[in-house]
Image (cartoon, rainbow, N blue to C red):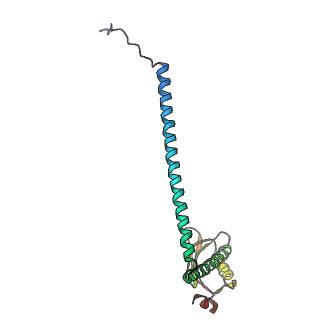
């Protein structure tokens, strides 16, 4: 058996001096701080430019609005906007009232709102709850008619899915408001 003998002197690993390590660390730190300041100043400049654009557009909008406010068309548009907001408020109140009456353990899966009717898809635990919900809807004086289209039993989920159509009251006053 041969013995492997290495007669070359062993090289000692050079240790990085503490000064070189500290200088490199300080240099990297200063570089990162410089990049952060440069990014901050760039963002501040962009923010100032956007603020200037906003103020210019606001001034321009005020000028144009003051020119337009006197026109008859704008007054009509404002009146129509008020009516639309009132209808939206009334509709959201109706939907809120309906949702509050959904039986415990039930949920509203879908609804579709048309001009004169609301279509609902509601899930309940029992068919009695579906019928009770129908009776509650019938009790609202806001609706002309409430119709149950289907009550379907889902065996997988052990619940009933019911489709309702609610016909909203439509009076002659509303016809007069539209013209």
Quadrant of residue 103 in the image?
bottom right
Along the horizontal axis of the image, is 158 left or right of 20? right
| Left or right placement of residue 104 versus residue 122 in this view | right
Q: Is residue 121 visible?
A: yes
**Which residue occupies the extreme left position in the image?**
2
- Going 53% across and 72% down the picture, which residue do you hit? 64
Vertical placement of residue 6 versus 161, above or below: above
- Picture quarter containing residue 179? bottom right
Residue 71 drawn above or below residue 20: below
Image quarter for residue 7?
top left
Residue name at image x 48 percent, y 34 percent = 31
Q: Residue at x 68, y 79 (%)?
A: 132
Q: Position of residue 150 (x, y in %)?
A: 56, 81
Question: Which of these two is toward me, 80 or 171?
Answer: 80
Give the image location of residue 160, x and y in percent. Answer: 59, 74
Q: How many marks?
A: 0
Q: Position of residue 84 (x, y in %)?
A: 59, 79
Tell me if residue 119 comes above or below residue 31 in the rendering: below
Q: Position of residue 171 (x, y in %)?
A: 63, 91
**Which of the two residues, 81 or 171, is positioned nearer the viewer here?**
81
* Residue furthest top as drawn: 7
Would residue 110 be seen by someone viewing this image from the given angle? no
Front position in the image: 69 or 154: 69
The N terminus lies in quadrant: top left
């Amino acid at each position: 058996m041969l013995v492997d003998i290495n007669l070359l002197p062993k090289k000692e690993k050079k240790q990085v001096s503490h000064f070189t390590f500290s200088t490199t660390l300080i240099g990297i730190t200063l570089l990162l701080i410089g990049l952060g300041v440069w990014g901050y100043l760039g963002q501040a400049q962009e923010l100032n430019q956007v603020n200037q654009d906003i103020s210019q557009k606001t001034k321009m909008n005020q000028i144009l609005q003051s020119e337009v406010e006197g026109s008859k068309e704008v007054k009509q548009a404002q009146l129509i906007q008020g009516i639309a907001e009132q209808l939206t408020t009334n509709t959201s109140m109706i939907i809120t009232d309906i949702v509050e009456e959904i039986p415990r353990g039930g949920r509203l899966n879908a609804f579709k709102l048309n001009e004169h009717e609301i279509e609902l898809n509601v899930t309940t635990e029992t068919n009695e709850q579906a019928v009770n919900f129908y009776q509650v809807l019938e009790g609202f004086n806001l609706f002309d008619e409430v119709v149950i289209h289907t009550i379907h039993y889902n065996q997988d989920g052990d619940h009933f899915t019911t489709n309702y159509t609610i016909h909203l009251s439509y009076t002659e006053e509303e016809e007069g408001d539209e013209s």
